[in-house]
Image: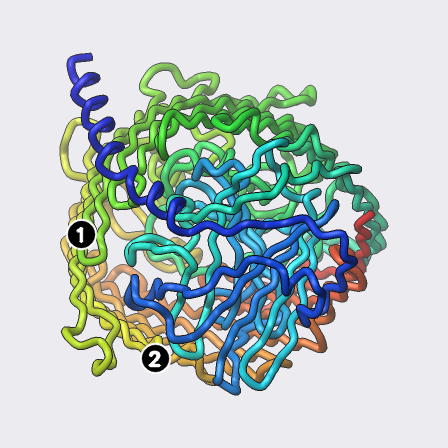
Amino acid sequence: MRFFYPVLLLLFISRLVHAQSRIENQAQFQIHIQRTKEKFTVDGKLDEAAWQKAEMATDFLIKWPTNGVKSKTRTEIKLCYDDRFLYIGAVCVDSTPDYIVQNLKRDVGYWDSDGIAVLLDPANRATNGYFFGLTPAGAQTEGLVSNDPQNDNFTWDNRWFGEVTHQANGWTAEFAIPFQIIRFDAGKQEWGINFIRNDASNGQWSTWTRMPLQVEGTDLGFLGKLIWDAPPPKAKGNYNISPYGTVGLSRDFEAGEAYQVKPNAGLDAKIGIGSSMNLDVTVNPDFSQIEIDEQVVNLTRFDVQLPEKRTFFLENADIFSNFGIPPIRPFFSRKIGLDEDGRQIPILGGLRLTGNLNAQTRIGVMDMQTAAKNGNPAQNFSALALHRRLFGRTSMSAYVLNRQNTGKDEGHKNTEGSNAGAEFLHISNDGKWTYWATTHGGFKPGFAGKNLWGNTGGQYVSDRFNILLDVLHVGVNYNANMGFESRIQNYDALYDTTIRIGYNFIFSESALRFFPANPNHSRLNLMELGFSNFTVLNPNGSLNEQFDNLNYTWNFKNTTEIKTWVETTTARVPVHFKFDEETNEKCPPLPNRTYHFAVAGLSFNTDNRKRLLLETEATAGGFYNGRQIGATIGFRYRAQPWGNFGLKFQYNLLDFPAPYCDVVLFNITPRIELFFSRKLNWTTFIQYNTQADNFNLNSRLQWRFRPMSDLFLVYTDNYAVQVWGPKNRAFVVKLNYWL
């Protein structure tokens, strides 16, 4: 308790010192918007009379690779609105004849392409907002942004309209964003707003407002002000229903099944509750059109966390999934409807209520019900999350999670459990200082005491310097029942058993950036010297693992990047371990003892604006009681605008002394993307992974025949690599329609 008042005083002083940047931006960068009765045609031409009367935002400032300098590439933005839509018109002057557009798919490749985007904060509180962007090819990107840009969600999809046209001296873009998809408080006439111009062809990004170099372009702390001539109109009929139907032909060879025809149907519904809450309902959801997981080579002793791709779990996902830190997430939506092997478990239905209770409070409520399958019992998953802004960009958050069996099978009590926790976060208004403190509990039958974890730390980021320190404790009986935790479970490959070990860790990293003295006459954007230390301690304070990494990076104006590093490791491994499935059949796993080794690495990525991109990485050095040689080579050819062709090859040789087996791991992933238009594309993704003993082919044709309505044809085939036999195969036709 004696630390409470000094900490409170520190935060108060920090708020006074750093609040000025947001106030200055909102005072300097303002744009007014007026209602129009004119009928708009969204065609990218900006020929309606209302555009001639609208106030203009221009004189963008370079955000990267320098900042605060007026951009030589002119951008003009105008806004107006009617009863249904917020309209944004953009004129992007550019003499470059060959625009850079990495992809015609929605939400793919936007930040490496030319583009124009708007950032909206209807509450004007720097807590959460919306992002809408267009490329010169008309490809759309939208996202949900939060007070921490690292947690922005660009997998959110909703129905809005955008078109572009080209002229001799550049291109114009026209946005029509329905008020129906934006949650805002009725009567509020001042919103936060910013505009971001991607000028990838010239290697620079600019924004309307002044932004420090060290913060992300989507940082809500640096918005200007949008002033309405009257309160924006409340959306009417704020709901939509999206039913779907599928027909699938599939066969599970490993289970000895014959081909089966499986029809299916369900629906998703989105219902606006007031002006700032949203209720999502799903009945028998289907995710057969979602791209398969990208397989990775895992050279650690612990599980890796694969990203969530299923659409229902992505909107407002930060309300639930941002708790914790990357190694430990109390809520991880992949636990719902997927077993430990990634096989699907039917979701019978669910609902999610998310949004703003008021200007200071966000809330999320979720309840999902799954069916029994693959030896897993029927279960109910429920979640409640609350985020409260205290002052400035300081917030408190809390959550309660529960996972419960709903069937009669009493043999799976080990899958049940609940979690609860609270977090404190402070971000200074200039984005330089961040402080956090968290506490979490995991409760499961049979695990009493030592079931808590928590961490605290801080970070300072400026244009030239970055330093971070985080300290964490995890009790041996903590269980992430609906989440992901990477280190407690230690699998012993010799005895085929798992040992639970609690731990503490200290993680620190720092970076020093060097800028050329004369940037106009240098090929470099910057150079960066970095160092990180990750020390893991056992509960008694003895060393478990320690990693020290020293690295140096050269970042060039043409987007080429070179990085080199050296990493040393000390590991006191408490179990016998292995890195492939065949080790125990031929020779023993590696022993449980202390290891010291070091590895050096070099990576080189060529100019991603070119049609042909090369990405390479090489590592060599020690690896536990042996040595390793690793190489990754990736090629991508962009046949703009109709195709992308890629090939990634990973090779790892783990050379161990006798009697331990050498391990050779291959991962080969070709990818072909064909774009017949923005509405019709065909993607084929192939993976050959010896570590996972899997060869996978996934081919998907998507036709967006109207906004947010699609026809999918999906073919998936899996083979075992070692014996080359089929595992499972499926062909699915899916139609969803947005009403």
Label 1, on which residue?
A: 510
SS class, disc 1:
strand
Extreme-top residue of the structure: 1
**Residue 193 in the image: x percent, y percent?**
49, 49
**Residue 609 in the image: x percent, y percent?**
44, 79
Q: What's the amino acid at mark 2?
A: Asn
Q: Residue at left 25%, top 60%? A: 659
**618 shown above or below 27:** below
Q: What's the amino acid at mark 1?
A: Ser
Q: Point out the tag, 1 or 2, that comes first from the N-terminus.
A: 1
Q: Nearer the viewer, residue 105 or 250?
A: 105
**Residue 143 in the image: x percent, y percent?**
55, 51
Give left or right: position of 107 versus 162: left
Q: Give the position of the N terminus as an image quadrant.
A: top left
Label 2, on which residue?
A: 558
For the question of whether residue 684 can be seen, the reply is no
Q: How is the image coloured?
A: rainbow
SS class, disc 2:
loop
* Classed neighbour count for the residue bearing mark 2: other residues with Cα under 10 Å, few (<14), some (14–19), many (≥20): some
Q: Toward which corner of the image does residue 497 lie, by quadrant?
A: top left
